[in-house]
Amino acid sequence: MREDESNWFSKWEDELPSPEDLMPLSQTLITPDLAIAFDIRTPNNHQQQPPPSSQPNSGEFDSPEMGAGADEPARTLKRPRLVWTPQLHKRFVDAVAHLGIKNAVPKTIMQLMSVDGLTRENVASHLQKYRLYLKRMQGLSSGSGSAGDPATDRLFASSPVPAHFLHQGRPNSDQFLPYVPVAALQQQQQQMAAVAGHHGQLQPRYGHFGSPRNGQFEHPLLNRQNQQMIHRVGAPVHPSSYADEFESANGRRVLTLFPTGDD
DNA sequence: AGCCTAATAT
DNA sequence: GATATTAGGC
């Protein structure tokens, strides 16, 4: 699709409108609030910020649709790449464990995690890798302790893999999985583990899991309901959830989200 | 519409 | 090297 752009690119580049010409449009894409919140300068500079959060809705959930029309730059702007901190990954693992492998698909995982700024794509991508990791673990589970190179998987190794993740696969007899004490306790309120150098802590949203059920169980009725009515239990509403963004060594921008501060 | 896997791009 | 994006199939 995009093959040799290098040739015509420079020509094309010459005829680009000046930043000023583009600005009026950009401004309509960025709400004043966001601009202020993220300190976005209007003139030149083509890097914009992600809208990591929805609204500071007191106790309720965000209204789903974009009907409002006034603001929704969210879809247009490109988010910084997400950094999967051990904390965030743990949330991910917990969510998968609670959903049961069967229901653990990107969308539901994302919803259960309820970390704002987190997209389905983020989860899907991570899930893909996590599954590969689990698969590799399967193979080398017997015998010696560590499977694979820790160097490659230190993130995944940072959260214990619930036992039932490991040998499941056939839809034949999946109802006699041993009780797994996936205690979600533990874990301190440490912050910023992933970023060397600076502040990297971020509050996610609120949330916690309701019932400590384990993977094997399906929720017969918690399935359809409302798309955004997944139960989020736990600490209510932090006025504003933060997502911190900064530059990494490379000049890439990264987003560090924070999993619930209370687990 | 979402999901999955594999490949590829940043 | 880690994450994102895309392609193609289901």
Image (cartoon, coloured by chain):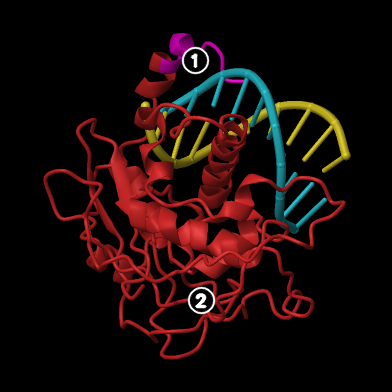
Chain colours: A red, B cyan, C yellow
> Relative to residue A63, is residue A104 depicted above or below?
above
Q: Quadrant of residue A238?
A: bottom left
Residue A172 shown left or right of residue A243 in the figure: right
Residue A245 shown left or right of residue A199 in the figure: right
Q: Which mark is residue A5?
A: 1
Q: Which residues are magenta?
A: A1-9
Residue A110 shown left or right of residue A255 in the figure: right
Q: Is residue A121 visible?
A: yes
> Relative to residue A33, is residue A18 depicted above or below?
above
Q: CA distance from mark 1 to mark 2?
A: 48 Å
- Label 2's element? loop
Q: Which mark is residue A209?
A: 2
Q: Is residue A49 visible?
A: no
**First-in-chain label (1 vs 2):** 1
> Relative to residue A14, is residue A93 depicted above or below?
below
**Quadrant housing the C terminus of chain A:** bottom left
Instruction: Tell me how many marks there are.
Output: 2
Residue at the front extreme of this rendering: A143
Residue closest to the eye, A141 or A45: A141
Q: Quadrant of residue A207?
A: bottom left
* Amino acid residing under circle 2: Phe
Residue closest to the eye, A95 or A250: A95
Q: Residues within 10 Å of mark 2 (few under 14, many from 20)?
A: some
